Image: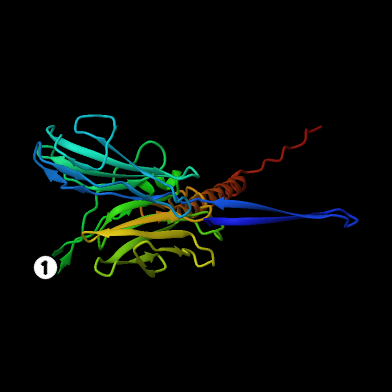
Amino acid sequence: GDGNYTLNVTVTDTLNHRNMTVNRFVTVDLVAPVVTFSVSPVNLNPVEAVTIGSCVATDRMDPNVQGILSIKKAGQSGYTSVSAGSYTDTNAEGVYTVRCTSDDFAGNSVTLEKTFTVAGGGVSGGSSGGGGGSSSAPGPIVKKSLMRGAAELEETPVSIESSEAWDIEGSVQYAAATPGEVYSFSFVPLASDTGVAEDHSIVISNVDEEAGTVTLIIESDPQEITLSIGESKEVDLDSDGVTDLLVTLNGITDGLADVTFAKLGDWIEPKEVLSSTVEGRTIDTWVWIASGVVVLLLVVLLLVKIFSKKAVPVTVPKGRRR
């Protein structure tokens, strides 16, 4: 895991004449920084002021990590540098995207995007997390669980694997997680002989802004953990005694949790498995049926051949008379 390590090396010759110890200090940093910032309001009219908060970056190993802000205005394709503050340069209608990025000394990077909409753009503001490379995948659209009488609408999970940062950097940050949101991902246990991935999910069970805590339920083998702001916990997904996932609570704002999910160690790439179901029957069943038909045809052909031989009269040629 991340941390500072000291390597001690002792060298002696075969006659034990000389002994020298060398110390080497090594820093391991595999986790990207965590960034936070704010945009308010997320819906406004042209030339109204929008306030962009500072891009604050923190890293477990790099104390000098910094956050950088940039903005892509409505109708534009590129980002330009921007500083924290209030702006009224919002005459163009549409969606504005503000990006907060950070790199640590080990080269781990993270990108967090938030949007605001000037009236007429037709898209409401939101946020998305990602990292790695020069772009960040847009945040997935999540359907919230709503109660209508006694029926509860089903919630659509957020696929962690849809984020480019999950594959490149091994970590994804979500800055606006709400109670009830579900984040799904797949994981291949180290002890797996087949390499088939298991489906797992992380449920934001409770967000307590007053206490500064968030409770999550990690499944398929349910594990409930509670995090305080700034706290990280490691999770063993397959009960093999080795932790596989790092969950961090970065902060809580207006009842929304800022969380980061990161891989620990080397994750096994899942193997593609051919679907075993064809119109309600398994492929194995069809193989057995086909084999049975072939065997039956061979038996029928053999019987036909045997009875055909018995049906042919045998003519013995008579000898020539002398």
Secondary structure of residue under mark 1? loop
Judging depth in this view, the residue of 284 and 185 nearest the camera is: 185
**What residue is rendered at 41% in x and 38% in y?**
133
Q: Position of residue 113 (x, y in %)?
A: 29, 44
Above-or-below relation of 191 to 271: below
Q: Position of residue 27 (x, y in %)?
A: 56, 51
Horizontal placement of 176 versus 247: left or right?
left
**Label 1, residues with CA under 10 Å away: few <14, some 14-19, many ≥20:** few
Residue 135 visible, this angle:
yes
The residue at which mark 1 appears reads as 149
Residue extending farthest to the right is 15
Q: Quadrant of residue 152?
A: bottom left
Judging depth in this view, the residue of 192 and 23 nearest the camera is: 23
Horizontal placement of 9 versus 123: left or right?
right
**What residue is rendered at 49% in x and 64% in y?**
238
Horizontal placement of 59 versus 113: left or right?
right
Q: Position of residue 212 (x, y in %)?
A: 29, 66
